[in-house]
Image: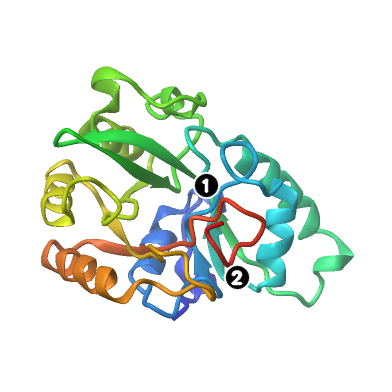
Amino acid sequence: MAANLATVSTSKKPAAQDGAALRQVFGSIDAESCPHVYNFHMHTNHSDGQLQPELLMQQAIALSLTGFAITDHHRVSGYQVAQQWFDHWRNSPEAVGKPIPHLWVGAEITSQLIGTEVHILGFAFDPEHGAIVPYLQGNAPQGEAAQAAQVISAIHQAGGLAVLAHPVRYRRSPNDLIPAAVNCGIDGVETYYAYNNPKPWRASPSETQRVRQLSDRHHLLNTCGTDTHGLSLLQRI
């Protein structure tokens, strides 16, 4: 299901930081959204992915994605290169007659939640805001700065949305982690995720049902993403 982004966005912020539009999109995500309509978890070679940002953008356009975000670990340099390429492309003759996807800024931040290492996805934040800049220097945060509540607060201060990535991949149960993340102010969870990397990509049914029940119980937003690290946006690796 795809939200009509042309009617959603009323913000004066840059499109990549339009949290209101993104919140409405997250409200529309279902099992069929990813990977051919939306994709909110992907990596470039600026962190641990293989795709150059420009090639990632070319794939996203070829797939006719409606919206997506690049979520490199602890940095936004890949996003910035992609955004520059995107700005040039959409003003070129090549873009005429083609659907224009919505690219949001994003990052994946390693955090500590009830004594467990987790990953928090930040979306639609201002990457130059002082609260988030320390988390975008290329290294995982340490000490108090790594606590999930601190990470989520930094994302919120920078105007973004915070999402618990792949909640069934950790050492502790999502039954423990999701309520703890809620107590820290999390906005959503990555509900639709392919834990066994099937081909073609498909959100894992049992894990999805488990996470969706917890999400509904705690009134959270839902996201989806392939967590691409390889050369195709349609697979994790």
Residue 63, image x, y percentages = 66, 72
The quadrant of the rendering that contains the N terminus is bottom left
Task: Determine the image quadrant of residue 101.
Answer: bottom right
Q: Is residue 104 above or below residue 143?
A: below
> In the figure, is residue 89 to the left or right of 237?
right
Q: Position of residue 127 (x, y in %)?
A: 50, 34
Please provide percent x and percent y for residue 79. Answer: 61, 43
Q: Secondary structure at mark 2?
A: loop
Q: What residue is pinned by disc 1?
A: 105
Q: Earlier along the polypeptide chain: callout 1 or callout 2? A: 2
Examine the image and state in which quarter residue 93 appears.
bottom right
Going by the numbered disc 2, the residue's amino acid type is Leu
Name which quarter of the figure residue 206 lies in.
bottom left
**Image: 151 above or below 226:** above
Viewport quadrant of the C terminus: bottom right
Discs 1, 2 touching: Cβ within 8 Å: no
Dot 2: within a 10 Å radius of its alpha carbon, few (fewer than 14), some, or many (20 or more) residues?
A: many
How many numbered markers are drawn?
2
Which residue does the image show at 23% across and 29% down from the upper left?
Answer: 147
The span from disc 1 to disc 2 (Cα, nearest Å) is 15 Å
> Which of 70/8 is in front?
70
Residue 98, placed above or below residue 133: below
What residue type is disc 1 on?
A: Val
Q: Indicate the position of residue 32 as horizontal and vertical percent values.
A: 43, 80
Residue located at (75% from left, 49% from top): 85
Query: Which label is found at residue 65?
Result: 2
